[in-house]
Image: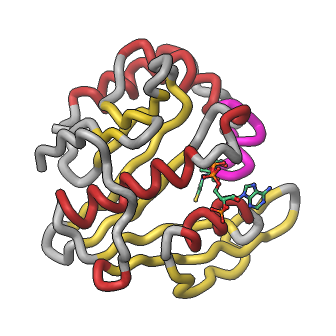
Amino acid sequence: MTPTLTTARLRLTPFRPGDAELLNRWAADPVLCHYGDDCPADPETIEQTRAYVEKVIAGADDSIRRWAVRRITDDRLIGYCMAAFIDRHNRRCKAGLTIGDQESWGLGYGREVLDALVRHCFEDLGLNRIGAEIFAFNERSIRLFEGAGFRREGTVRQSVLKDGRYRDEHLYGLLREEWNGAPPCVDSKSNT
Ligand SMILES: CC(C)(COP(=O)(O)OP(=O)(O)OC[C@H]1O[C@@H](n2cnc3c(N)ncnc32)[C@H](O)[C@@H]1OP(=O)(O)O)[C@@H](O)C(=O)NCCC(=O)NCCS
């Protein structure tokens, strides 16, 4: 079961059926698609997104944990994040996050989410390594992950085709032994 994580201004919760509408809009947003996978030629239908959210809520897959990111003040959904490819033998995973609400960019929410995610991976899941893959042109995300202590470990050259140009992708990693400890989660209800 995905536990709720609470930070100073945010609550990372399991998804709810009502999240599908915003997620569906974000899936077709050209700016978000630019920083993630490109928008598919046929945008996801609301029924497909609802089915996806239902599947996530059912939570059958133990190798991935996904959270909806909500502002505490008004419970508004502003993004989502995940620990994916959780490998309990090698104690590693890959982290990803999106602040879908672009008006909320640059306010420190990304950092708050990443800190909570990292803490959960190391302290609750007992992992040793968190990886991340970041497009070389995604300066904001690079600042975010490097600020949280992730180190660049390599570059996959010409990994993605964006606007008719092949672009590189950086591989990042953070080891438990390098982690200085994020600001504490407030009232973290973490069941592993
Ligand atoms: C990347 C993303 C999660 C960052 O979220 P955010 O809430 O804007 O992040 P923060 O406000 O916490 O800022 C994170 C860092 O980016 C820096 N930053 C802000 N604006 C920036 C800009 N225009 N260029 C470069 N860095 C910038 C901030 O200063 C901060 O760095 P600092 O901690 O050294 O000051 C968000 O922009 C997003 O969802 N982008 C689209 C999806 C995406 O790229 N996901 C990551 C895929 S790996």
Magenta segment range?
28-39
Q: Which residue occupies the foreground of this view, 55 or 88?
A: 88
Q: Is residue 49 left or right of residue 38?
A: left
Q: Residue 149: x percent and y percent?
A: 49, 75
Q: Is residue 48 visible?
A: no
Residue drawn 79% across the image and 70% down it = 166
- Residue 29 part of the magenta-drawn span: yes
Residue drawn 38% across the image and 25% down it = 53
Q: Is residue 183 placed above or below 113 in the rendered structure?
A: below
- Residue 3 part of the magenta-drawn span: no
Q: Which residue occupies the foreground of this view, 13 or 168?
A: 13
Q: Quadrant of residue 187?
A: top left
Q: Quadrant of ligand 1?
A: bottom right
The number of callouts visible is 0
Q: Residue 178: x percent and y percent?
A: 37, 83
Residue drawn 66% across the image and 44% down it = 107
Q: Quadrant of residue 180?
A: bottom left
Q: How is the image coloured?
A: secondary structure
Q: Residue 72: x percent and y percent?
A: 44, 26
Q: Quadrant of the N terminus?
A: top left
Residue drawn 35% across the image and 19% down it = 16
